[in-house]
Image: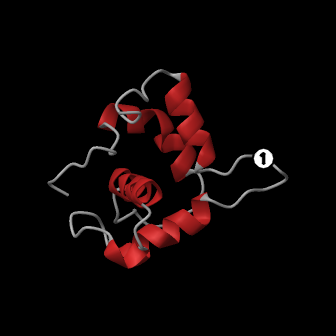
Amino acid sequence: MEKTYPRDITKEQFEIIEPLLSSANKTTRPREMDLYHIFCAILYVLKSGCQWRMLPKDYPKWCNVYYYFSIWSKSKNNQPSLLEQPLKKISRNNSYKRWSQ
């Protein structure tokens, strides 16, 4: 992914939330997709309201992005989903400034 979009978070911001997101899937083989790009693509869809299939080509394939969205957005026992938790964590650490532009 070469191009950056205004709603993308920085790599430093993502390092804060990566352990939380990577804990969602138990994998036995190395991950082929970069979770940073997946997360930024999800943010793009959430902010723009575009359809999954209309994701810009700079992001990973829409079906891969949607797969992670479906995993991370599940809520258990009335707890915030894995997608909601990082957003709160970023804003709590005051790293969310770039996002609120």
Q: Residue type at mark 1: give it.
A: Gln
> Which residue lies under the disc numbered 1?
79
Q: Is residue 94 left or right of residue 83?
A: left
64 vs 5, nearest the viewer: 5
Residue visible at 44% across and 63% down in the picture: 49
Report the colour scheme. Answer: secondary structure
Q: Quadrant of residue 52?
A: bottom left
Above or below, comparing residue 32 to residue 19 in the picture: below
Where is residue 31, by image quadrant? bottom left
From the viewer's perspective, tell me whether residue 86 is left or right of residue 96.
right
Badge 1: few (under 14), some or many (20 or more) residues near its Cα, within 10 Å? few
- Residue 57 placement (x, y as % from top left): 22, 70
Residue at screen point 52% across, 28% down: 91
- Residue 97 % position (x, y): 39, 26
Q: Identify the residue at horizontal 16%, vertical 53% (top origin).
A: 3
Please give the name of the residue rendered at 28% of the width and 63% of the height, measured from the top-left corner.
Answer: 59
Look at the picture and state if 93 lies above or below 83: above
Q: Nearer the viewer, residue 17 or 3?
A: 3
- Can you say which quadrant of the picture contains the C terminus? top left
The residue closer to the viewer here, 7 or 14, is 7
Residue 57 located left or right of residue 97: left
Residue 15: which quarter of the image? top left
Looking at the rendered structure, the secondary structure element under dot 1 is: loop
Q: Position of residue 78 (x, y in %)?
A: 83, 50
* Of the pair 44 and 68, the residue shown nearer to us: 44
